Image (spheres, grey):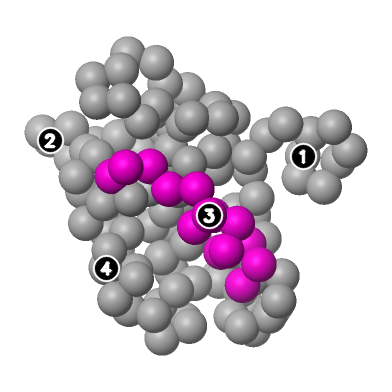
Amino acid sequence: MPGVPGNTLGSRWGTLYAAFPCRLLPPDHPLVTGTIRKFEARLSPGGIPVHTGWMKDGMWVAITLDNLAEVLLLQDEGDRAIQYLYATLNHGTPLYSWCEEPRQQPGSPDCTGDRQHLWTPWP
């Protein structure tokens, strides 16, 4: 869990739920903007935030769109959100599905998660 001493997980994305969809914090709240800065401090060569889940070198592409890009849209940062949309599309399979959290290397058989994230591309 985030915020626990000694925690090695990268899951910090839950903070963004406070801005959207819950709207408990404004999108410019320091906790929200700090979380986004943390995400954007480490991007894959393809432009996806790295270590947003269990794998230090993994990319949870659903979090990129379903949390990060949604909050960027609330912040009037549409161009940045669109960059993440294209980066996510570029990481999909030919049928546009994604494992929950793949590694950065193209064609890597290593991934983690509980299912395919077929819902990622849908509004």
Q: Residue at x 32, y 42 (%)?
A: 45
- CA distance for labels 4 and 3: 18 Å
Tell me where the magenta segment starts and ends, as one range.
33-46
Q: Which residue is mark 2?
A: 95
Circle nearer the N terminus (1, 3) = 1
Circle nearer the N terminus (4, 1) = 1
Q: Is residue 26 magenta?
A: no
Query: Local crowd at mark 3 within 10 Å, few (<14), some, or many (≥20)?
Result: few
Q: Which residue is mark 4?
A: 82
Mark 3 residue type: Ala
In which quadrant is the C terminus drawn?
bottom left
The picture places residue 40, in percent across and down from the top left corner, at 49, 57
Rendered view: 120 above or below 24? above
Mark 4 residue type: Ile
Q: Nearer the viewer, residue 115 or 36?
A: 36
Rendered view: 68 above or below 10? below
Label 4 SS: helix
Label 3 SS: loop
Q: Which residue is mark 1?
A: 1
Circle nearer the N terminus (1, 2) = 1
The picture places residue 116, in percent across and down from the top left corner, at 35, 31
Q: Which mark is nearer the camera, 1 or 3?
A: 3
The picture places residue 81, in percent across and down from the top left corner, at 34, 69
Label 1 SS: loop
Mark 2 residue type: Leu
Q: Which residue is mark 3?
A: 41
76 left or right, relative to 27:
left
Q: Residue at x 46, y 31 (%)?
A: 58
Q: Which mark is nearer the camera, 4 or 3?
A: 3
